[in-house]
Amino acid sequence: MTYGKDPYKFFFEMREKYGNVFVFVLLGRRVTVALGTQGNNMVMGGKLSQVNAEEAYTNLTTPVFGEGVVYDVPNHVLMEQKRFVKIGLTTESFRAYVGMIEEEVELFLCTDSAFAAYKASGVDMWGSFDAYHAMSQLTILTASRTLQGNEVRGQMTKTFPQMYEDLDGGFTPLNLIAPNIPLPKNIRRNKAQKAITEFYMNILRTRRERPSEDTEYDMIAALKDQHYKDGRPVSDREIAHMMIALLMAGQHTSSAALSWCLLHIAHRQDVQDALYQEQVEHFPDSDGSLRSPTYEELKGLPILDSIIRETLRLHPPSHIIMRKVVSDLPVPCSLGNAPENRTFVIPKGNYVWAAPCVTQIDPSIWRKPMEWEPSRWTETGSLAAQLYRDYAETGEKVDYGFGMISKGTDSPYQPFGSGRHRCIGEQFAYVQLETILAMLVRKLEMKIDHVPPHNYHTLIISPQEPRSIRFRRRQ
Ligand code: HEM
């Protein structure tokens, strides 16, 4: 109960009492929490023979994504599937995505009823929008336009949203433990899963039977051409299930991150002004307006970038990383505070959690850790910048089967996880977040009196209601 009410408070209080490693029972499961950078390393850098993600997550994910993908397959198959997806996430595609996202933002502001004050151009009128609700919509619209293909985007104002909502209803904490209770929610989830799978399989069939020159090289096209190492092609059903997995993996994470970014910049006028000025300086057009940015240009903007990094530090969408212990797991002495000459062992069958959300606000690492202060990432010689470089660029590199990546398992800052399960959507999420934020700050002035607290009742930590941002069209 205490964990469910406020996981941060719970973790810090338990650490104060027992040190970095402690056990608690959650809905009948014995969970060992391993905090600190060593805890991060033990869980994210753990050997496959000792810790396992599939068994920790499959109850939740397989009924939603479908069989044969992600956590319904052995780890080596997941690594191959991640390799296939990465083939569809190239710099070339990111370049094309920036323009598509830009168009989607403009279309959304001109058509969504919450933004009537934006449409009333030339009139100095204030309106308001629910940050999480609006950003969820922008996230799914932009992800479908870019990653999911024209056919899915075409259905976004029709049948898809209801199917998506029903499927999403399957993501509840209870389903981690008991996914098949015949509750109305689960029945709707199963029905939607079948319908969306069929929808993607139809797209594949149509593309095969009636190839069109207009079909873009999107994620579906990239997956269609892939083969496993044993020569087996990826089946249509697997492609459909991978597409669902990608949609779901990026939806709540990116929309939560986006809404926290907006809530903070609406609250901190100085940061909002600096962000806007950054756009004005970099993208002036000859007629006095702002021209479209390129992917490379957006990537290099320090203020925009630091706002996202700082938001993911304070509000990482996934606050815990879970694994099942599949063989007895000794805890390193320096982590576990075991009495002399003894070692703590986490027994097989228990669960082990890391909580990078704790190292991301640990006062022994970060200056004023609870303050949202993007400038910590841009100060010369700053620790934050060094930590980020190690996590994303300069640290040890490893290939787990889906290309060379930074290992990052002992980093105190790891919003996208690390090791073999590191997020493959990281670069895409940055393109999406950067483009949406840049476009919104160009078009809107935003205000809010307080940044709302965390809502811990959802799997992904979102902002609590009320979370309305007041806005007017930027003059
Ligand atoms: C701000 C946005 C995002 C955040 C903060 C985020 C965070 C994470 C984290 C922490 C993990 C590691 C989970 C673990 O180790 O147990 C992860 C895994 C994953 N993410 Fe993301 N993610 C984001 C966006 C996306 C997007 C847009 C996609 C797809 C396009 C995506 C696809 C995945 C997949 C497929 C995995 C599973 C990898 C595995 O278990 O090997 N994510 N993400």
Image (spheres, grey):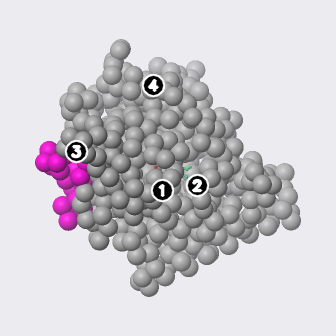
Mark 4 → mark 3, Cα distance in angstroms: 34 Å
Q: Quadrant of residue 231?
A: bottom right
Mark 4 → mark 2, Cα distance in angstroms: 28 Å
- Tell me: 39 left or right of 291: left
On the rendered image, what quadrant is the C terminus found in?
top left
Residue lying farthest to the front in this orientation = 341
- Tell me: 219 left or right of 312: right
Residue holding disc 4: 389
Please report whichever mark, 4 or 1, sits nearer to the chain's N-terminal start.
1
Q: What kind of residue is marked 1? A: Asn
Please report whichever mark, 3 or 1, sits nearer to the chain's N-terminal start.
1
**Label 2 Cα neighbours within 10 Å, binned few <14 / some 14-19 / many ≥20:** some
| For residue 160, above or below residue 307 | below
| Image location (x, y in percent) of residue 5 | 21, 60
Which residue occupies the foreground of this view, 392 or 149?
392
Which disc number belongs to residue 52?
Answer: 1
Q: Element under label 2?
A: helix
